[in-house]
Image (cartoon, rainbow, N blue to C red):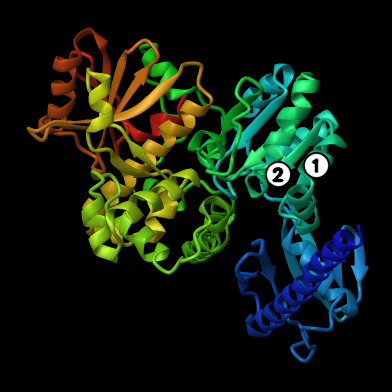
């Protein structure tokens, strides 16, 4: 017993020491940041140290009195003014805040005060699916990439349904989850547990608790990794848990109510545009992507800065959580190499040669990025389903903004390098279809088609009954007869399974192009 207490005391002391060092680092970062900001500049302060939670602060500095040192400040948090001695804990709270915090100089107080501005809350497509699952399933998991909005959605359900909220990003909660998962879960009921992948042993404890009490809606979990693929997960909670995927914002979530394009097209109707994005507006939307933090930033420079820090944080922290990888030096270069071949077949040997990795390591690293919902390996469509497993898959990034940053593609560059933009645009359309599939009435698989004669279709959507929808993506405002060759080949092979072939292009008109073939604006993806 004494030995156990000493161990716990030692671990607690280590956590406190680490927190103090972490806070000092935050203080130095923040003070340096304030000193460097010119008047009226909008900037970002963040902590990017390994293993630490990443938070961003949107800061507006109005240095009316430039002689006032920036560390003489009062921070207003939740309506309470804090003196200079409370700067550090206040800053830590702001870092963990779900809101943007605007810091403004107050001449009345000769200080800088903060004002929280909640991020715009977008309606999420899967919200009704989560509510339905909680009504009849003991455990519901919202899975998806970090910063996609899982915590915001889970917190909203916690508030509406009176559930307790815990996050494993909190070091003390994480310690309890790892040291005594059974004891922790025994004391909980109707609870939200955020970032469950950080303590996967909790799943076994949840299984035991649910087996004893099968009431629906007992646990709402969120995870930034595919838990079913984690080697440390001993039990999948099969039959006890429903998993729903929350990806970055779709354009229909950003721009307002829209019909589900997949359900509508399979029913024989291509939606009409309600919010047309054409030309430069489409370029902007594609390179912005769908992460809420990126969408909220006004300038390309600020979005790029956020995206780069997001990628760094994933590699430094989450890769260790997901796969236990310690040698991380190759990963940034490897991820950039993957960005250059997005939309192409996965040649593992060639990819490895570019960054000095062997075939096995390349496959493992790609698996890790896939578990973190950064990319997907897309299977080829074939009538024989076994052939889908043995043919080479295609690589697609899920978020076009992330891909654009990794590929160093700017809005200016799209006018001179349409080929590179075409690859990112294909990824954008693939991501939109993937998001629509998470909340559709039908059950759809996203595949692609390619044969030895180089006939190709960018996306082949297959429903549960085997019906097919072919989607070809064009970055131009015109459609040529040659653009139909892949869809026509797919239609001849699939026969009656082929429902419709659609060329999505950068235009404004929906036009028939032949038997079951159409051209439609990309903006119909979020139309009505």
Label 1: which secondary element: strand
What's the mark number on residue 194? 2
What's the mark number on residue 115? none
Q: Residue furthest top?
A: 496
Q: Residue furthest bottom?
A: 67
Q: Residues within 10 Å of mark 1 (few under 14, many from 20)?
A: some
Mark 1 = which residue?
165
Could you tell me if residue 113 is visible in this image?
no
Which sits in the foreground, 239 or 98?
Answer: 239
Left or right: 123, with 269 as reference point: right
Quarter of the image where one finds residue 158: top right
Left or right: 57, with 489 as reference point: right
Left or right: 10, with 444 as reference point: right
Could you tell me if residue 85 is visible in this image?
yes
The image shows residue 190, relative to residue 137, as above or below, that is below
Are circles 1 and 2 on residues that touch, CB within 8 Å? yes
Q: Earlier in the sequence, mark 1 or mark 2?
A: 1
The image shows residue 344, relative to residue 58, as above or below, that is above
Name the residue located 33 percent from the left edge and 62 percent from the top edge.
412
């Amino acid at each position: 017993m004494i030995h156990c207490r000493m161990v716990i005391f030692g671990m607690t002391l280590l956590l406190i020491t680490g927190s103090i060092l972490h806070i000092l680092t935050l203080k130095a970062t923040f003070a340096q940041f304030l000193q460097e900001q010119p008047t009226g500049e909008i900037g970002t302060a963040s902590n990017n140290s390994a293993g630490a939670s990443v938070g961003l602060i949107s800061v507006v500095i109005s240095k009316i009195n430039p002689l006032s040192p920036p560390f003489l400040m009062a921070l207003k948090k939740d309506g309470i003014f804090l003196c200079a001695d409370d700067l550090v804990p206040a800053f830590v709270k702001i870092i963990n805040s779900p809101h943007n915090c605007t810091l403004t100089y107050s001449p009345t107080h000769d200080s800088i005060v903060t004002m929280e501005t909640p991020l715009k809350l977008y309606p999420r497509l899967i919200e009704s699916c989560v509510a339905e699952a909680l009504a009849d399933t003991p455990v519901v998991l919202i899975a998806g990439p970090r910063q996609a909005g899982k915590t915001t959605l889970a917190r909203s359900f916690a508030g509406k349904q009176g559930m307790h909220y815990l996050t494993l990003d909190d070091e003390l909660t994480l310690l309890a989850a790892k040291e005594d998962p059974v004891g922790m879960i025994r004391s909980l009921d109707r609870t939200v547990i955020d970032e469950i992948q950080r303590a996967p042993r909790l799943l076994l404890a949840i299984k035991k608790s649910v087996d004893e009490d099968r009431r629906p809606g007992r646990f709402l979990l969120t995870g930034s990794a595919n838990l079913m693929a984690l080697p440390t997960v001993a039990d999948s909670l099969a039959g006890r848990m429903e998993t729903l995927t929350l990806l970055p914002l779709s354009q229909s979530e950003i721009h307002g109510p829209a019909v589900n394009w997949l359900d509508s097209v399979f029913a024989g109707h291509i939606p009409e545009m309600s919010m047309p994005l054409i030309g430069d507006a489409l370029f902007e939307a594609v390179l912005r992507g769908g992460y809420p933090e990126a969408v909220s930033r006004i300038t390309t420079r600020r979005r790029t800065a956020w995206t780069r820090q997001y990628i760094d944080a994933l590699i430094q922290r989450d890769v260790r959580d997901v796969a236990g990888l310690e040698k991380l030096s190759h990963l940034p270069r490897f991820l950039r190499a993957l960005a250059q071949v997005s939309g192409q077949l996965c040649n593992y040997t060639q990819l490895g040669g570019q960054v000095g990795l062997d075939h096995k390591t390349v496959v493992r690293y790609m698996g890790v990025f896939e578990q973190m919902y950064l990319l997907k390996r897309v299977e080829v469509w074939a009538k024989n389903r076994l052939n889908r497993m043995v043919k080479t898959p295609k690589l697609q990034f899920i978020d076009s903004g992330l891909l654009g940053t990794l590929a160093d593609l700017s809005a200016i560059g799209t006018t001179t390098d349409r080929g590179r933009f075409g690859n990112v645009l294909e990824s954008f359309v693939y991501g939109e279809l993937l998001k629509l599939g998470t909340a559709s009435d039908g059950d759809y698989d996203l595949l692609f088609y390619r044969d030895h004669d180089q006939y190709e279709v960018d996306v082949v959507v297959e429903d549960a009954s085997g019906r097919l929808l072919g989607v070809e993506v064009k970055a131009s405002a015109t459609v040529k007869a040659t653009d139909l060759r892949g869809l026509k080949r797919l239609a001849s092979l699939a026969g009656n399974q082929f429902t419709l072939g659609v060329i999505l292009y950068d235009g404004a008109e929906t036009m028939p192009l032949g038997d079951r073939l159409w051209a439609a604006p990309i903006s119909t993806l979020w139309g009505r």
